[in-house]
Amino acid sequence: MRKTFFIVFLLFSFSTLFAQDRISISGTVVDASGITLPGVSVLERGTTNGVVTDIDGNYTLSVKEGATVVFSYIGFLSQEIKPQQSGTINIQLQEDVVGLEEVVVVGYGEIKVKDLTSSISTVKSEELAKTPSGQAMQALQGKVAGVQIVNSGAPGGEPTVRIRGVGSFPSSSNSSPLYVVDGMYFDNIDFLNPSDIETLSVLKDASASAIYGVRAANGVVLISTKKGALNTKTSITYEGYYGIQVPQNVMQMANAEQFVDYVYQTGSAADISFVENAMQRYGRSRVNPNVPNVNTDWYAEIMKSHARQQNHSVSVLGGNDKTSYSMGINYYDQEGLLEAEDSYKRMNIRASIDHQANDWLKTGVNFNVSNGTRYIASSSAWFSAYHAVPILPVYDEQNYEDLVAQGIDYPSNYSSAQLLDYRGSQNPFLSLAYNDSRQDIRKVLAGIYAEVELLPNMLKFKSTYNSSMMFLKARSVGLPYYITNSTRRSLSTISSSRTTNVNHFFDNTLTYTNSFGDHNVSAMAGMSFRDEWYDYLGGSAEDIPLNENAWYINQSQSETSKQVGDNGERLYGISYFGRISYNYSNKYIAYFTIRQEGTQKYQEKWGTFPAFGLGWVVSEESFMDNTGILNYLKLRGGWGKLGNDKIARQDGANTTNPVYLAIDDMQVDGTTTTSTFGYLGWETVTGTNVGLNAELFDNRLSIDADYFIRDTEDAAIPVSLKLQSGSVLRNVGTIRNSGLELAVTWRNEINKDFSYTVGGNFSTLKNEVRDLYGQSYINGGQAEFRQRSQVGEPLLSFYGYEVAGIYQNESEISADPVAVDNSLVPGDFKYVDQNNDDVINDDDKVFLGSYIPTFSYGGFIGLNYKDFEFSMNIMGQTGNKILNRKRGEIIWTNDTNIDADLANGLWTGEGTSNKYPSASALRRGWNQNFSDYLVEDGNFFRIQNIQLAYNIDGKKLFGAGMPDARVFVTAEKPLTVFKYNGFNPEISNGIDRQFYPVPAVYTIGVNLKF
């Protein structure tokens, strides 16, 4: 009996002690406006004991008395409490304006902003929405320091993106970054609906990107699409806009009167005869009888006054206590500016589901299907319109009637300069009206994952399988026409192709996280397997039926014209990688990653790519406690090694034909009959980055600064073959990119109704060739428009003569030995004699500048007043040059129009011009040398985007069941200021042969949330 009583007494005592040791707290978590927050993590520090708030923001948790309870939620500052007794504790979380507690996506994981040691810029969906666009990267233009984005005006056109310069020869590789969308690798994201993006992170330095090995040399863009959340009410969102694209900065070409003056100044008999024939056929102008009665503005003819653009998206997000989901559908439609079949349409359907099966297992599935159709108008129309003469009409009905009367097949009512016995057709509509080009692009992305929590909140294993499939069907048809015997296409033509890309990715990671005292440790180890292959089948033929339903190669009536070709490649790769991060007391941060990459693409099968980063949060030190002004300061630095595998493996081979003597067919010594193979592998890039992050004046001022050096140490460069002609690519070059980046933001809340944000980013860039394997230089471009790469100079700089002015009179000619020796006349170019030897030759050629900008900047302002929002972004760049090749080709063809700037500036006598030569001089070889006459400044300033929005609280104004709404109007690229003689000063490679111009876009839209 006493034993039984003693046991009961002990059990009662222990239970009493246990009950006294634990307390129960409950309450509601809200934001600063009092809105409840579902999904907030409520965790007892140092344990796995925790819950998340329900759909109404409520929580209940039993904890030890005196324990620390941490409330954390993405986008808000964490809050800690130490409850002493049971009861109700309501929590109000403050928005993390600075974003130090925010989690950003990094390679194969996430990390808090405050723990970063790398240079990573993250843009959220709200910022992307301020620039309505069918391409996500277009919305980043001017917003991220160190990232150059050159947009394309063509419907569905993909922008050119460069992160921290150019590290490879364009002939051997491209400089586009790696895109990782929910774990899948892509070379572009033209298929992706920007409205589906939750966050977009740009990994700029090597220490951040090294985890992706040979794919990361040009930087990495990580994209996370929108997901549902547990314990969240179902929400339905509609996002739509309608926009008008308007041509801007349209080139002014010489009108009919200016062109005729130019022709007579050249003294060309053929051109003068052409003018007289035009007056005879089309009559004389009433204003000026010496000019034909035709004055065609070809750009106005081939371009629409405006083109529409529209986008409509519907998404559904939500979740219960076990499952979250996100679904969406999108339709995008963009018309082109050309008066032709010129458009892009895309339909996207996506879905993702995440399911918490139990306490230790989480699974998920996602898919995205994109179906796009692009009609591609002939790009040569832009070039033709620049050259087309204004005294030729678009149509020649008289000729058409004559052709019909003669029974000519395929008569055309378009005009041609050859009707007037002139060279060329001179009519851009021939390429627009008689060519039909279409692409059908289908992409299917699918992925599944399973995540097992081996130790609660400490150790988890995740296995992911992703697959992407792309099917491209391309067809181009040339239709027959007849204007004259020399301006015709007798037979229809067709080229057709099918391209298939299928990629499989299988990733497995094991992640460990733990905190003990002031020590915070995270480690990850993983393995990745990839299987990538593409298959191409294409063919061409002539003489197909004109019925569109019969536009197939097999319908050709000419068996001999049929040609078929196919190609393909399959690549396997396996990688092992790991990451360790350590944080002591939120003051000292260390970060290390490594990736071992294996591939069968090159002779060297394996490569190792390590990286590390260090950080010191100075503001957490005791000696910084009373600084007052400074709220946060972190110094950081890192180094990493990357690879670039975008070089085709066959580029290391070159077959040289043997040379034989005329006598007895004897082979010449030193030549070879065998192929040459150079050892070729991936390029190696090492990067060093040091920087700081600072917050001042109660976190109202943010400063992010970086200095970087990025060296491509095994650049694949052309190496001349000894005793042979030609060259092969070898990994023996070195190219350096270095620069400074600075981003500054000031934010302030004046009162509850009014707040504002203003900021800017600035970046410098120095591109330099450092080693060419002993070669003095490597030439690029064409002989008439030379580019040169030389140690100490930027990659592929323009190279030619400097123009000192124009010879004005005979006395100036007679006093200059160069002019006398070359029989020059007034109106000719005066080149700079660099070595003062009275001879102009190759020794006088100099570097004329680079297409790579040396300084870029962007700025923004955001105003919020009650329910109104206003934002404006600006951007610009300096230090780059543009080769105005379209103007240069005027010199070589001698049968074209000229632009109005040149027509108005031609030298016509002493003192009339010291910039442009005379009209006749343009026809002489001396003035056709490549010089800085054709190399212009690419500096520009642009108002990139202006948006005004109004937010409507539907429930407050109209009652329950009504959606919240956001109505906005946007002006994109409404103003660009520049001096360059072209449509647009943004040319990705710096060579302008008249690309598709980028329009201004004016948009009205609405977002509805139910």
Image: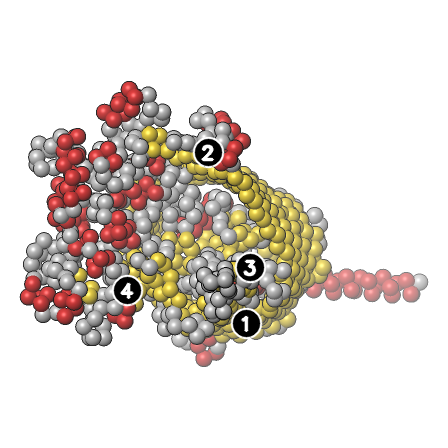
Vertical comparison of 372 with 866: above or below: above
Hey, which quadrant is residue 757 in on the image? bottom left
In percent of width and height, residue 550 lies at: 49, 27
Q: Earlier in the sequence, mark 2 or mark 4?
A: 2
**Residue 410 visible:** yes
Q: Which mark is residue 120?
A: none
Q: Which residue is mark 4?
A: 800
Whichever of callouts 1 and 3 sits on the residue coming sooner in the sequence is 1
- For mark 3, does the 10 Å Cα neighbourhood hold few (<14), some (14 to 19), or many (20 or more) residues? some
Q: Disc 2 residue type?
A: Glu
Which residue position holds label 1? 612
In this rendering, would 1006 be left or right of 836?
A: right
In front of the other: label 2 or label 1? 2
Q: Residue at x 42, y 32 (%)?
A: 492
Give how far apart the Cα atoms at labels 2 and 4 are. Answer: 43 Å
As measured in the structure, the alpha-carbon distance from the residue carrying label 2 to the one carrying label 3 is 34 Å
**CA neighbours of label 4 inside 10 A, class few (<14), some (14 to 19), many (20+):** many
Q: Residue furthest right?
A: 1
Quadrant in which the N terminus appears: bottom right
Residue 669 position, x and y percent, is: 49, 69
Task: Kindly identify the amino acid type of the residue bearing the numbered disc 1.
Answer: Phe
Residue in the image at 26% along x and 51% along y = 892
- Could you tell which of marks 2 and 3 lies nearer the N-terminus? 2
